[in-house]
Image (cartoon, rainbow, N blue to C red):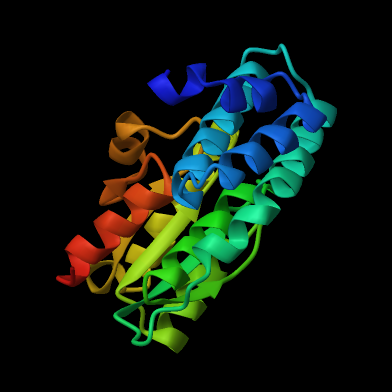
Amino acid sequence: MSDLASTPLAQALGDLEEERAVLLVSDKLAKGEPALNVLEELQAGMNIVGERFEAGEYFLSELIYAADIFKKASAPLQAGLSQVAPLTCGTLVLGTVKNDIHDFGKDIVATVMRSNGLKVIDLGVNVDYGRFVEAIREHQPQLVGLSCLLTTAFEDMRKTIETIAEAGLRDRVTILIGGGPVDEATRDYVGADYYCRSAQEGVSTAKRVLGVS
């Protein structure tokens, strides 16, 4: 577990304390803390929720409630994350893989990527394998981002990448993956190029791949 998981904000979200989480975000912003720093603490809190879900401590109702808390707590951050860059430095096709309906992490990634000059094609959640293929053909992206919160969706992530390869498109794109339970071992298993622990790491990785600063 990362050091961020021990912060009061991450713990509040992990413990499903909605009022406290929202208040902590407001307090941090009032003190001038960068929106991205606050966002990373919220993401750490969602990682706690994901771990508790996988351990059987939380159930679907808690998972949905946590997503709602995340959205409410992160809403004030959008202004600080959405300073649209003047030029588009590349294109990212993004989606939550099949059999996973969670969008909170994906939505933040989309916002942060756009704020850093990337054109983002957001396919939504529970995205069928072939839909990614269609989007790659239509939009010609350099990057594909796959998100999931459930370990049960790792197989769908792997099949998505296999489908892209079977369509003859694998060499055309760099594939980034992320989400609460995702790690380097997941990257190896599904055949992705990069694992990104946070939205900001995703931006750094994308820029490195695209060769921009």
Q: Residue furthest front?
A: 31
- Quadrant position of the C terminus in the picture: bottom left
In the visual, does 176 lie left or right of 99? Answer: left
Q: Nearer the viewer, residue 178 or 97?
A: 178
Q: Is residue 2 visible?
A: no
Total marks placed: 0
Q: Nearer the viewer, residue 69 or 135?
A: 69
* Image quarter of residue 183: top left
Location of residue 153 with respect to 207 vertically, above or below: above
Q: Residue furthest left?
A: 211
In the visual, does 126 lie left or right of 183? Answer: right
In the visual, does 20 lie left or right of 191? Answer: right
Location of residue 129 with respect to 74 vertically, above or below: below
Query: x and y percent of residue 182 in the render?
Result: 44, 34
* Residue occupying the point 65% across, 48% down: 74
* Residue occupying the point 47% across, 39% down: 40
* Residue occupying the point 32% across, 40% down: 187
In the visual, does 190 lie left or right of 54? Answer: left
Query: x and y percent of residue 62 in the render?
Result: 80, 27
Query: x and y percent of residue 38 in the render?
Result: 52, 41
Q: Nearer the viewer, residue 171 or 103?
A: 103
Q: Nearer the viewer, residue 142 or 71?
A: 71
Q: Is residue 17 visible?
A: yes
- Quadrant position of the N terminus in the picture: top left
Query: x and y percent of residue 123 in the render?
Result: 59, 69
Location of residue 36 with respect to 28 vertically, above or below: below
